[in-house]
C-alpha cells in the first residue's frame, strides 16, 4: 500500500489563516502549496519573516479592520483600499479622522447589539419562540 498524499492548502489560504498578506510573503511561500505539517510548524515556530509581517505588516484588510476596531465595510467606507502597516494604523488611531471615529462608534453599537441578542437567546434557550 502507498502512503496517503499529505493534505495541502494553497498559499493564499495559508496566508489568510496565518493573518498575513500573501504578496508580502517570500516568493518560496507564494510558489508552493503548504502541507498541513508545514502549516502547523509555521504556527508553532514562526520564522523571522512571519514574525516580522505579523508585527509590522503590511496587513490584510481583516487585520487592519481588527486593529482599528472597525468592520471591513467600515474600511471601504473610509476609503482605505490598500494594505496598511502597523505604523500607518497607529498614525490613523492618533489622528482619529472623523470617518474612523464614526466607524468605531458604529462597530461598538453592533457588537453591543450582538451581545444583547446572544444573551437573550441564552436566557430564552428553553423557549420555542424565535420572535423578539
Image: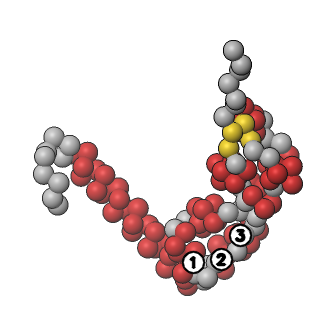
Which residue lies at the image location 13% right of the left edge and 45% below the top edge? 127
Q: Which residue is mark 3?
A: 83
Badge 1 density bin: few <14, some 14–19, many ≥20, Cα 10 Å = few
Total labels drawn: 3
Asked if residue 21 is positioned above or below residue 50 in the image, the reply reads: below
> In what element is the residue under mark 3?
loop
Q: Which residue is mark 2?
A: 81
Which residue lies at the image location 46% right of the left edge and 73% below the top edge? 105
x then y, percent, for residue 83:
71, 69
Q: Is residue 90 visible?
A: yes
Q: Quadrant of the N terminus?
A: top right
Badge 3 density bin: few <14, some 14–19, many ≥20, Cα 10 Å = some
> In what element is the residue under mark 1?
helix
C-alpha separation, residue under disc 1 versus residue under disc 3: 12 Å
* Residue 122 horizontal side relative to residue 45, left or right: left
Residue that protrudes farthest toward the bottom in the picture: 98
Mark 1 touches mark 2? (CB < 8 Å): yes
Q: Is residue 44 visible?
A: no
* Residue 86 horizontal side relative to residue 108, left or right: right
> In what element is the residue under mark 2?
loop
Chain-order first, disc 1 or disc 3: 1
C-alpha separation, residue under disc 2 versus residue under disc 3: 7 Å
Q: Quadrant of the C terminus?
A: bottom left
* Colour pattern of the rendering: secondary structure
Q: Which residue is mark 1?
A: 76
Which residue lies at the image location 68% right of the left edge and 24% below the top edge? 4
Asked if residue 36 is positioned above or below residue 25 in the image, the reply reads: above
Amino acid at each position: 500500500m502507498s502512503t496517503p498524499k499529505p493534505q495541502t492548502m494553497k498559499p493564499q489560504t495559508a496566508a489568510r489563516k496565518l493573518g498575513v498578506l500573501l504578496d508580502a510573503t517570500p516568493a518560496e511561500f507564494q510558489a508552493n502549496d503548504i502541507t498541513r505539517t508545514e502549516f502547523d510548524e509555521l504556527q508553532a515556530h514562526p520564522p523571522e519573516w512571519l514574525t516580522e509581517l505579523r508585527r509590522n505588516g503590511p496587513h490584510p484588510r481583516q487585520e487592519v479592520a481588527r486593529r482599528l476596531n472597525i468592520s471591513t465595510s467600515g474600511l471601504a467606507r473610509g476609503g482605505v483600499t490598500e494594505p496598511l502597516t502597523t505604523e500607518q494604523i497607529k498614525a490613523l488611531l492618533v489622528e482619529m479622522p472623523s470617518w474612523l471615529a464614526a466607524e468605531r462608534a458604529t462597530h461598538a453599537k453592533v457588537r453591543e447589539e450582538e451581545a444583547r441578542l446572544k444573551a437573550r437567546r441564552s436566557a430564552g434557550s428553553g423557549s420555542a419562540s424565535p420572535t423578539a
